[in-house]
Image (spheres, rainbow, N blue to C red):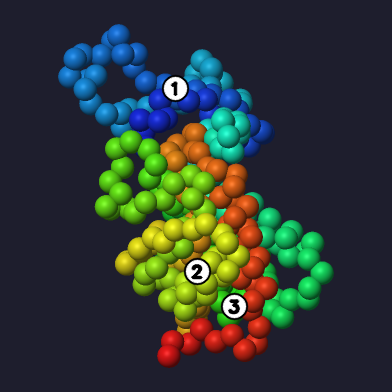
Amino acid sequence: QIGGWDPQVLVGQRVLVLGRDGDVPGVIGKKAIHLMQAEERRKSSRVNQLWVDVGAEDRDAVVALGVRVGDPMVISQGMVRLAGELIASRAIDDRIGAFVVLEAIRILERESSELLASATAVATVQEEIGYQGGGARPSAYALKPDIALVVDVTFSTDVPDIDKKEVGEHSLGGGPVLSRGSAAHNNVFEMLAEVADLEGIPHTIQASPRATRTDADGIHLTRSGVPTGLISVPNRYMHSPNEVVNLDDLFHTAQLIAAFIRRLNPEVDFTPR
């Protein structure tokens, strides 16, 4: 499997196999519950117990559809509006980060004031499987940034059965989450928090003492080191076909990024004192 999927949410899902000749629809199958022994029913599903049914009768029929070993597949699930300002969709982690960054650029573009710092928006791949920054590491190496802001998602804790003592208290509608820890430069964090307060942007703080499991882990160690900040959007049901976020959080995060960039100038120094 590519990325950290929970096998329990995969059973019965419709998928698209990204085949050589185009997308091939299929469904993820598993033995029907009626045919399971009592002990089997009590066990969690494992990936090696599941299969993808594309409707083909045999191997030759599969090949004729343009499907080969190693073809990736994605959940066939669109975005839906829920009550209030909530949306549900697959791949919010972390396509929503790309949306937020683009929205921040739009905000800056609409303003008439001239920026005193240049900003580059980058969308990278392999964060879920790279473990040490994926595509963000070579991007940071090539760009040589003076500072980097990483936008990702984090766990929304406003649902049952989540230990807030472990992951903190972050709710949908509570605004962006600012990380503090070894990969998040403290001076960048302080400036983000100050800007959020000045702009009246709601936010919470998350402790990440070790790895953040985001692109920040790779970026902050690139070349001689990059002062890096991590801003996250609260997200329910992460790594499932129906992740849920609040639209207000998206726009508050974009506003924070834009306001932060506006305050950058050649005199800003993130060197620890």
> Is the residue marked by circle 3 packed among few (<14), some (14-19), or many (20+) residues within 10 Å?
some
User: In the rendered view of the protein, which quadrant contains the C terminus?
Assistant: bottom left
Marks 3, 2: nearer the viewer: 2
Instruction: Tell me the number on the disc at residue 12.
Output: 1
Which residue is most to the right?
A: 112
Residue 74 or residue 174, whichever sits in front: 174
In the image, residue 66 sits, relative to residue 190, either above or below, namely above
Residue 120 or residue 100, whichever sits in front: 100
Mark 2 or mark 1, earlier in chain = 1
**Secondary structure found at label 3:** loop
* Mark 2 lies on residue: 193
Type of residue at label 2?
A: Ala
**Secondary structure found at label 2:** helix
**Secondary structure found at label 1:** loop
Side of 31 relative to 198 (left or right): left
Mark 3 or mark 2, earlier in chain = 3
> Is the residue marked by circle 2 packed among few (<14), some (14-19), or many (20+) residues within 10 Å?
many
How far is the residue under mark 1 from the one under mark 3? 45 Å
In the image, residue 143 sits, relative to residue 266, either above or below, namely above
- Tell me which residue sits at (56%, 37%) in the image: 86
Instruction: Tell me the number on the disc at residue 145.
Output: 3
Marks 2, 1: nearer the viewer: 2
How far is the residue under mark 3 from the one under mark 2? 21 Å
Marks 1, 3: nearer the viewer: 3
In the image, residue 35 sits, relative to residue 111, either above or below, namely above
- Tell me which residue sits at (56%, 50%) in the image: 249
Which residue is most to the top?
A: 34
Type of residue at label 3?
A: Pro
Mark 1 or mark 3, earlier in chain = 1
Type of residue at label 1?
A: Gly
